[in-house]
Image (tube, helix red, strand yellow):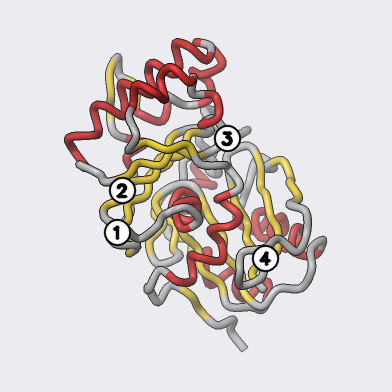
Amino acid sequence: MTLAVDCGGTGLKASVLDEAGTLHAKPIRLPTPYPLPTERFLDAVAGLAAELPRADRATVGLPGMIRHGVVIVTPHYVTESGPRSRPVPALVEQWTGYDARAAIAARLGIPTIVLNDAEVHGAGVVTGAGLELVLTLGTGLGCALFDGGVLAPHLELSQAPVRWGLSYDTYIGDRERRRLGPSFWSRRVRRVVEALRPVFVWDRLYLGGGNARVVTPEVLAALGDDVVIVPNTAGIVGGVRAWELGHPRWTEPEG
């Protein structure tokens, strides 16, 4: 049984699944609390786990650059009141180099892996055939790349500049979606996809995250058959398949 926790900029979602990926509890959601020091984050994850059936292991997806379960940089959790608000130096210091994998494993008492949230999302949808890119459209832009079903090193594509001084994160993030409306925002998504196509030369591109469903049918049709919309529930279902990625990214709890 796997506890899967999908940590976003605005909400933390969790459920427990069996080895076949079947949910054994209705997913529960908690608004992401801000400010969010690391201990408060641990309390939130443990609180979600306490409301769900017992699990034998845990998979946690976090926004930002995560390497071997350690937070290199995370964009939202270091801020005063959430995405796009002012970073707090003390929180930046706390989260930079934070060994989330070890901390969560010790708190829950079960083996744990911690990946970027888009990587967990991708684990839930990739087929293992060829080069598969996953882009998640939510608070910002998430990215995960798989080659033959093997997870590649993470690229924090969201922070790359696009135009007008905007990063991908802000150019097609949720704030711009709400400002522009579905039609104009979807055109931006198409521009991003077409700009990245010659960079990755993917066999399949999956668009996931909470805002993927907002992409208009006209834009989706124009993107071609190699671009597929996938449900946001992949961020939970991927919690099981993430253990099959072939990387030694889990740790036993201390003691």
Mark before the other along the chain sequence, 4 or 3: 4
Question: Is 230 displayed left or right of 36 in the figure?
Answer: left
Q: Nearer the viewer, mark 4 or mark 1?
A: 4
Q: Residues within 10 Å of mark 1 (few under 14, many from 20)?
A: few
Mark before the other along the chain sequence, 2 or 3: 2
Q: Quadrant of the N terminus?
A: bottom right
Q: Nearer the viewer, mark 2 or mark 4?
A: 4
Q: Which residue is mark 4?
A: 17
- Do the residues under discs 1 and 2 have CB atoms within 8 angstroms? yes
Residue at image x 29%, y 59%?
152
- Do the residues under discs 4 and 3 have CB atoms within 8 angstroms? no
Mark before the other along the chain sequence, 2 or 4: 4
The kind of residue tagged 4 is: Leu
Q: Nearer the viewer, mark 1 or mark 2?
A: 1
Q: Residues within 10 Å of mark 3 (few under 14, many from 20)?
A: some
Q: Which residue is mark 2?
A: 155
Q: Which residue is mark 1?
A: 152
Question: Is 170 displayed left or right of 85 in the figure?
Answer: left
Q: Position of residue 114 (x, y in %)?
A: 50, 63
Provide the secondary structure element on which disc 2 rests: loop
Residue at image x 68%, y 72%?
108
Distance, label 4 to label 3, CA atoms, is 21 Å
The kind of residue tagged 3 is: Gly
Q: Nearer the viewer, mark 2 or mark 3?
A: 3
Q: Which residue is mark 3?
A: 210
Distance, label 2 to label 4, CA atoms, is 28 Å
Q: Quadrant of the C terminus?
A: bottom right
